[in-house]
Amino acid sequence: MSGVKELAYVVYEVGDLADWEHFGVELLGMQLGERGADRFTLRLDEKAHRWIVTRGPAEDLVTSGYEVEGDGELDALVEKLRAAGLQVDEGDAALAADRRVERIFATTDPMGNRVELVTGLADADTPFASASLLGEFVTGAGGAGHQVLLAHGVSREEYLGFYQGLLGFRISDIIVEELSPGIVADLIFLHCNGRHHSVAFGDMPSPKRTHHFMVEVTDIRDVGLAYDRCMDAGQPFEMTLGMHPNDQMFSFYVHTPSGFAVEYGWGGLVIDDATWQVRTLDRLHSWGHRPPGVVAELLAAAPSPLHSTEPSPLDSTEGEER
């Protein structure tokens, strides 16, 4: 396989570790991996971790770890990156041990995001177990999930040159939607395995490096249960339940304690590269995915049947015998 095979893990730097642990374990249903003084890890499957959460001021994504098939493929990829003029540094034994991988190299994408290229992400010492899930998280050949990154003015040619031209991602599709007059959402979605996309890019107005990370579950009931847990906990939502037209994911979006979002979904499309055709779509959502503020306004404006002044057919007693 040429290039990366999956999004293996992410590293976030956050201010409040306790809030983040509660968010990941109690609300999303992940399993706590290892906990230290200034960090902890979260598991989604048999791997040692998929999220590494460290203490720091960024409140954002700081590293994306992409796994490569083996040593030969990793060496070839590193050589390709260096030939393109990029600085690629080999990680030492301490970094490899921290990431629980066999080998590791680090470089930087055109937006300034740290990208780690690794082999051999280790399994945990114990089986995965969630206290909340009825099913499981969807990982395996599709990797940990997907993330949407902010382009921040970097041209599509530049970041595609890195992710498609060097790392070996393939374009899944493009969505261009005019959200309001003069405001256009323009996103491109890339895959490196059967998952519809492992990374996507959009130049949206946000100070963050990442817009969201998506986790997928095997049981649709777990989407509803997680939605209720987040609602009961007062965790702010970015979007209500809905579905995308491209990857067909049924999902909701909830804010992390750091302000960016997690998409929690079910039913994502699996791509067959032999038959897949790239399309440009004109909408981000098939239905739903409403901002909670819009929903609240609609509910406030709608007449309530409980307070209707119209007579109900049940109230009529004309012609009836008592």
Image (spheres, rainbow, N blue to C red):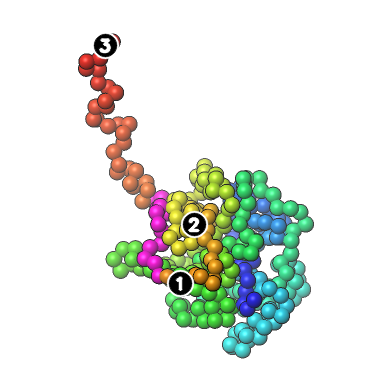
Residue 24 magenta: no
Q: Which mark is residue 249?
A: 2
Tell me the amino acid under the disc marked 1: Val
- Label 2: which secondary element: loop
Residue that numbered label 1 is attached to: 278
Q: Which mark is residue 32?
A: none
* Place of residue 283 in the rendered image (x, y in percent of width and height, measured from the top left): 38, 63
Question: Badge 2: few (under 14), some or many (20 or more) residues near its Cα, within 10 Å?
Answer: many
Question: Badge 3: few (under 14), some or many (20 or more) residues near its Cα, within 10 Å?
Answer: few
Which residue does the image show at 57% across and 81% down from the upper left? 166
Question: Badge 1: few (under 14), some or many (20 or more) residues near its Cα, within 10 Å?
Answer: few
Mark 3 and mark 2 lie on one chain; the one further toward the N terminus is 2
- Number of marks in the image? 3
- Label 1: which secondary element: loop
- Label 3: which secondary element: loop
In three-dimensional space, the C-alpha distance between marks 3 and 1, rounded to whole angstroms, equals: 69 Å
Residue that numbered label 3 is attached to: 321
Q: Magenta stretch?
A: 280-293
* Place of residue 119 in the rendered image (x, y in percent of width and height, measured from the top left): 71, 72
Residue 66 falls in image quadrant: bottom right
Front residue of 127 and 304: 127
Tell which residue pokes out farthest to the top in this image: 322
Q: Are marks 3 and 1 in contact (CB under 8 Å)?
A: no
The answer, for residue 256, to whether it is visible in the render is no
Which residue does the image show at 58% across and 87% down from the upper left? 84
Tell which residue pokes out farthest to the front in this image: 275
Q: In the figure, is residue 158 to the left or right of 30?
A: left
Tell me the amino acid under the disc marked 2: Met
In three-dimensional space, the C-alpha distance between marks 3 and 2, rounded to whole angstroms, equals: 55 Å
Tell me the amino acid under the disc marked 3: Glu
In three-dimensional space, the C-alpha distance between marks 1 and 2, rounded to whole angstroms, equals: 18 Å
